[in-house]
Image (spheres, helix red, strand yellow):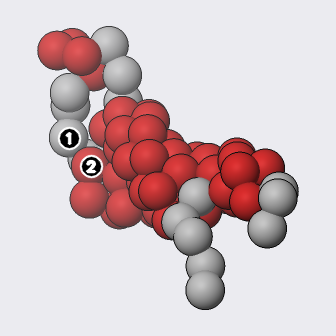
Amino acid sequence: MKHRGRSKLAGGIIGLIAGVFAGAFLGLVIGGTFLGGLDIYENTGLEGYELAAYVGAVIGGGVGIVFGGRRRT
């Protein structure tokens, strides 16, 4: 298998993109549900759902890179 490196790279990039979107979506859903009522805007400058979406996107991107770039048998 000569092109194994490209396959892992493509899988990692696709995993990153999918993970960012999925993580941001889940962050918005969870953040809107549980953190929407909290007044953390004064402390952080962000609303609760925005903060949850950003954190979810970062975590989802990391998980997407790891699982997308894994070697498949």
How many residues crowd around disc 1 within 10 Å: few (fewer than 14), some, or many (20 or more)? few
Three-letter code, disc 1: Leu
x, y percent for residue 56: 41, 48
Element on which disc 2 rests: helix
Identify which residue is drawn at 58% across, 58% down: 69
Q: Quadrant of residue 45?
A: top left
Identify which residue is drawn at 61% across, 79% down: 72
x, y percent for residue 34: 26, 59
**Distance in Å between CA atoms under marks 2 and 1:** 5 Å
Q: Nearer the viewer, residue 55 or 12?
A: 12
Q: Nearer the viewer, residue 60 or 43?
A: 60
Above or below — where is 41 with respect to 32? above
Instruction: Residue 62: give its label.
Output: none
Three-letter code, disc 2: Leu
How many residues crowd around disc 2 within 10 Å: few (fewer than 14), some, or many (20 or more)? some
64 lies left or right of 9? left
- For label 1, the residue is 38
Above or below — where is 38 with respect to 44? below
x, y percent for residue 63: 44, 56
x, y percent for residue 39: 20, 31
- For label 2, the residue is 35
Above or below — where is 55 with respect to 21? above
Above or below — where is 10 with respect to 40? below
